[in-house]
Image (cartoon, grey):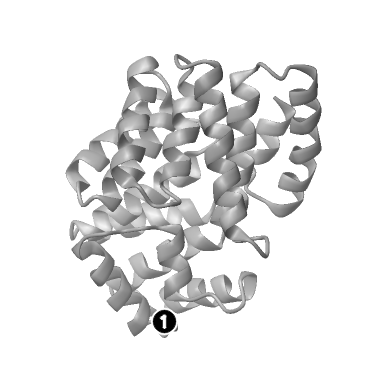
Amino acid sequence: HRAYDLLFRYAPDARAEAGPLLDRAAALDPSSARIAAAQSFLAWQEAFFEVSADPGRDVRRAIEMAERAVALDPLDPQGRLALGRAARLIPDLDFAAEELEAAVALNPSFAAAHYALGSCLKFMSRLEEAVATVERARRISPYDPMTFSFMSLLAELHGLLGDTAASVKWAKRAARSPQSHYNILAIVAWCHWRAGERDAARTYLAEVLRRRPGYSRAAYFRAFPFRGEERDLIDETLGAMGLPA
């Protein structure tokens, strides 16, 4: 539980503290599916933020521990969430969606699984379904540790659907969260740019580059593996903002 609290902070020092806690928990209870799912979540964050010299190793670790969680308890939605989230890193979006749908079916009140499914549907160009899914997550858990991601996802979706006013509203709310990391702020930046708020967009992009020197459009799409026309729209927007390929 302490490790999960740390992981939801999405911060390097928190991840460093969470790792030993999870190792200790796994040693005490090696048959726990939830501990394996948490270990997958840690590896997923390390892959998502590209913190090591071998991101591929982190991806493999995220998948391996998620598969272990599912093998230990196929009916635990935490394991299914972990596997669906990890599959997005490959990216195998169809498999990811299947696992996330399984997590939701196993526990319809699991807000994080609804959010993760909505994020996956977004990458598959199923935007209206994604909006409904993340709104369901917000209704289920209005004070969820992932609320900042719920809001950034709504900002993206409304921006892609052409509702720039709603997009900026959610982007501003997401940006205010202390958990909003540089990938989130990149979303906030392009949402402002699409809405014509260029100065705000440049300010957020400058903060992205301050936090992550050398950030690029390629890095953005490694984190967010769009595969439809939405990718072209975002790529064009980020390029217009001056972010290198």
Asked if 145 appears above or below 148 in the picture, the reply is above
Residue 218 appears at what percent x and percent y?
A: 43, 72
Viewport quadrant of the N terminus: top right
The residue nearer to you, when weighing 140 against 239, is 239
Residue 59 appears at what percent x and percent y?
A: 55, 50
On screen, residue 219 versus residue 3, left or right, reads left
Residue drawn 66% across the image and 32% down it: 4
Can residue 36 be seen by looking at this rendering? Answer: yes
Asked if 29 appears above or below 187 in the picture, the reply is above
Residue 186 appears at what percent x and percent y?
A: 46, 66
Q: Which residue is mark 1?
A: 245
Quarter of the image for residue 172 reads: bottom left
Q: Residues within 10 Å of mark 1 (few under 14, many from 20)?
A: few
Asked if 84 appears above or below 107 in the picture, the reply is below
Quarter of the image for residue 233 reads: bottom left
Badge 1 amino acid: Ala
Residue drawn 74% across the image and 29% down it: 2
Residue drawn 49% across the image and 74% down it: 205
Circle 1: element type: loop
Residue drawn 62% across the image and 32% down it: 38
